[in-house]
Image (cartoon, coloured by chain):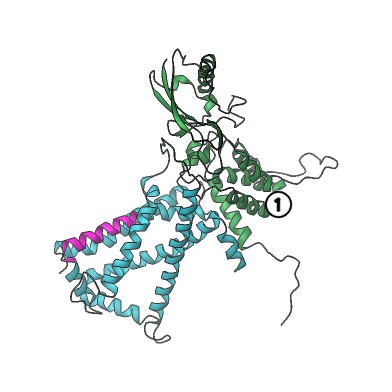
Chain colours: A cyan, B green
């Protein structure tokens, strides 16, 4: 633990936590997108997939055990990711008390400069998303646990809800466009030999995740799925 | 050529600064930016006004003394150029030019456009050196270095410590400077014995000076008059993580059997 405490003393160390937790969250979000695509195979498939998540690891672990394990891991990563990023933002702000009268960016891309805002939006979105499709508290009425397809259909027939989701995953794509490359750079895994490949990987990941995630609400909205 | 200059004027470190408009006429395009400021200062002195304080030394682009954020860019609009190597022909007649000091908590303004960059010196003192023996000189070529590696180390060693990376970074981070100084030693055999101690000490000193953190925007690389790559930042990070997370803490401790 003393090593972690040493790490958390510096901005470079805090960035390590943001990068590693970001990688875990990114890997999970990619699996989430692939799972969502089961919706296109029909109600039986996606409902069975959801039920399968709860019985993951059966018969060796109790019902819901693996699911809750993953949930706790994700929550820990999210808290660490946001907490360390918030500390870094505070330090970065303090490092330039007097702003420039004129400042012209030369190299940075829009998604890179947008990270704090996109991260904030995603944090709000994650809370709303869990309240919507995990607990069924908002935006869907009636919510029937386990009837994933019906819950999705009832939600996304409302154009506002569907477009809200498309907007949110667009923000996610922007966050990942910079974040997925940035985490490799932070961890010192990027170098001129693989820079182009890593940046392409980040761009393709961002676009692929956007397309995969947006497809479900848009398909319900367009009536392709019913 | 004629220019309208908006220059940050500040009497002393604790003073409240403000932009002051100065006009200057009859400037030849072949004057460097600093020579243009010299002319302005002559005119101000003749009129009995205080000249504009700014840093400069070699005026050949190698010493790292000149600074100035010109129209929102450290060292002005041209890539790979220090302010002293920027010429007035790069501007249009009648342009309004905003001139500001480097802005960072770790670089307090001393007067007008002069900032205190001794924070960089303290980062170097923390570990930017190799310990060598002062005995008889070693045989030539007794320490082979692959030429490509030597070139890479020299790429990092071209850092003149001007601070444009800090000035350009939206977070006021000194990562490119520190990474260059960590890397040009860490890449060479002479730098190996202190490699992991060095990176921890320098990163912690950088932190103590109040510089911000890196968000991988790449602005530093774009502003660096020597074009030093952010690849060195990744390299420094990796050395730092290895130093903190992997290098043995208790090298001489004993172990029990069980």
Task: Report the residue at 28% width, 59% height from top.
Answer: A168
Is residue B215 visible in the rendered structure shown here? no
- Locate residue A10: give its quadrant: bottom right
Residue A120: image location, x then y, percent: 36, 58
For the residue pair B81 and B24, the one nearer the viewer reads as: B24
The spot of residue A105 in percent (x, y) is 41, 39
Image point (42%, 30%), residue name: B71
Residue tagged by mark 1?
A: B194
Q: Is residue B129 above or below residue A88?
A: above
Number of callouts in the render?
1
Residue appearing at x 55%, y 27% in the figure: B54
Residue extending furthest right?
A: B136
Q: Is residue B28 magenta?
A: no
Main secondary structure found in the magenta portion: helix
Q: Position of residue B16 (x, y in %)?
A: 49, 36
Secondary structure type for disc 1: loop
- Is residue A166 in the magenta section? yes
**Chain letter of the residue carrying label 1:** B
Going by the image, does A142 lie left or right of A133? left
């Amino acid at each position: 633990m003393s090593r972690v405490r040493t790490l958390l003393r510096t901005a470079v160390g805090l960035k390590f936590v943001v990068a590693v937790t970001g990688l875990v969250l990114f890997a999970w979000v990619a699996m989430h997108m692939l799972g969502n695509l089961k919706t296109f195979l029909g109600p039986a498939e996606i409902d069975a997939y959801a039920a399968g998540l709860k019985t993951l690891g059966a018969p060796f672990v109790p019902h819901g055990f693996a699911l809750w394990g993953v949930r706790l891991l994700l929550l820990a990563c999210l808290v660490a990711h946001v907490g360390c990023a918030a500390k870094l933002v505070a330090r970065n702000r303090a490092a330039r008390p007097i702003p420039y009268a004129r400042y012209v960016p030369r190299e940075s891309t829009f998604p890179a400069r947008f990270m704090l805002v996109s991260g904030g939006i995603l944090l709000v979105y994650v809370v709303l998303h869990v309240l919507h499709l995990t607990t069924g508290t908002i935006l869907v009425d009636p919510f029937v646990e386990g009837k994933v397809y019906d819950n999705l259909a009832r939600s996304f027939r409302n154009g506002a809800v569907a477009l809200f989701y498309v907007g949110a995953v667009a923000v996610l794509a922007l966050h990942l466009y910079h974040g997925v490359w940035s985490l490799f750079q932070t961890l010192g895994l990027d170098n001129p030999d693989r820079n182009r490949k890593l940046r392409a990987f980040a761009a393709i990941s961002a676009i692929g995740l956007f397309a995969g995630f947006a497809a479900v609400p848009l398909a319900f909205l367009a009536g392709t799925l019913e | 050529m004629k220019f309208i200059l908006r220059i940050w004027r500040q009497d002393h470190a604790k003073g409240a600064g403000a932009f002051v408009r100065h006009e200057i006429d009859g400037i030849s395009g072949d004057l460097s930016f600093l020579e243009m400021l010299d002319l302005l200062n002559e005119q101000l002195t003749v009129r009995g006004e205080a000249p504009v304080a700014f840093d400069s030394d070699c005026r050949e682009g190698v010493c790292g003394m000149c600074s100035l954020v010109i129209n929102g860019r450290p060292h002005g609009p041209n890539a790979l150029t220090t302010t002293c190597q920027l010429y007035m022909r790069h501007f249009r007649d009648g342009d309004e030019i905003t001139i500001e000091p480097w802005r960072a908590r770790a670089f307090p303004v001393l007067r007008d456009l002069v900032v205190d960059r001794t924070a960089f010196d303290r980062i170097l003192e923390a570990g930017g050196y190799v310990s060598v023996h002062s005995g008889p000189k070693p045989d030539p070529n007794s320490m082979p270095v692959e030429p490509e590696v030597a070139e890479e180390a020299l790429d990092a060693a071209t850092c003149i410590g001007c601070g444009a990376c800090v000035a350009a970074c939206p977070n006021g981070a000194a990562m490119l400077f520190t990474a260059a100084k960590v890397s040009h030693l860490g890449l060479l055999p002479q730098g190996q014995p202190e490699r992991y101690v060095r990176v921890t000490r320098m990163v912690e000193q950088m932190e103590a000076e109040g510089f911000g953190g890196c968000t991988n925007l790449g602005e530093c690389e774009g502003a660096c008059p020597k074009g030093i790559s952010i690849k060195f930042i990744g390299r420094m990070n990796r050395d730092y993580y290895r130093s903190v997370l992997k290098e043995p803490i208790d090298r001489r401790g004993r172990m029990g059997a069980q």
